[in-house]
Amino acid sequence: DVKVTQSSRYLVKRTGEKVFLECVQDMDHENMFWYRQDPGLGLRLIYFSYDVKMKEKGDIPEGYSVSREKKERFSLILESASTNQTSMYLCASSLATGERQPQHFGDGTRLSIL
Amino acid sequence: KQEVTQIPAALSVPEGENLVLNCSFTDSAIYNLQWFRQDPGKGLTSLLLIQSSQREQTSGRLNASLDKSSGRSTLYIAASQPGDSATYLCAVSGSGYALNFGKGTSLLVTP
């Protein structure tokens, strides 16, 4: 079974802090994704990566950056956390083949910015 | 831009009923459609994936159908159980890598 592990289930940080959210997958997937989920807005893509050191902006990249130095690990960085970044953050991964493969999600990190 | 709509937003049924959840999307140029389950405060669990060339997929008591030309999918749950209570999300994969999600249907199955 695919395992996507997010380093923290709950995280509380202060405004202005630099915040790192970590995600690791164990299935050698090429594609990795960061989404945020907010009530009434659903899931929205922040960034995705299709290979090591490769990244593409999603729908809402402002205020975020990402890092993918190794295939299995994809980090989301909040450069200077703000209260409007309080949300549930979900990481996903998928295999890259000719036919689109399912995305597998981690358990999420509920981040509160005070 | 792809818009995904799920109806109803919430549903409450007694245990044992068969039920149908609906998903519609505006752009029929999709690669696949995926149904997920989300328990409160948890991540997403993939239930079924239907490739654009397929019409339906089945897993246990779940059956998902896809009508790409009309932009619709349904998730059929047979003989519902209290353990089926969760939010069900539909997502489509289009020209980009990302999934476009609906806002979900919150299902409550009462004993």
Image (spheres, rainbow, N blue to C red):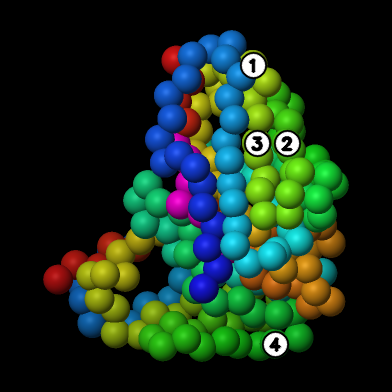
Magenta segment: A104-110
Q: On the rendered image, what quadrant is the C terminus of chain A found in?
A: top left
Mark 1 and mark 3: span between their CA atoms? 12 Å
- The x, y position of residue A66, in whole percent, is 73, 36
**Tag 3 residue:** A76
Real-space Cα separation, disc 2 to disc 4, in angstroms: 35 Å
Image quadrant where residue A59 sits: top right
**Residue A80: assigned label:** 1
Q: Which residue ends up furthest to the left in the rendered image?
A: B111
Asked if the residue under mark 3 is in contact with the one under mark 2, i.e. CB atoms within 8 Å, the reply is yes
Could you classify mark 1 by the number of other residues whose Cα lies within 10 Å: few (under 14), some (14-19), or many (20 or more)? some
State the CA–CA distance, disc 4 to disc 3: 35 Å
Q: Please give the residue where the numbered disc 2 appears in the rendered image.
A: A66
Amino acid at the residue labelled 2: Val
Q: What SS does tag 3 mark?
A: strand
Residues A39 and A6: in front is: A6
Mark 1 and 4 residues: CB-CB less than 8 Å, in contact? no
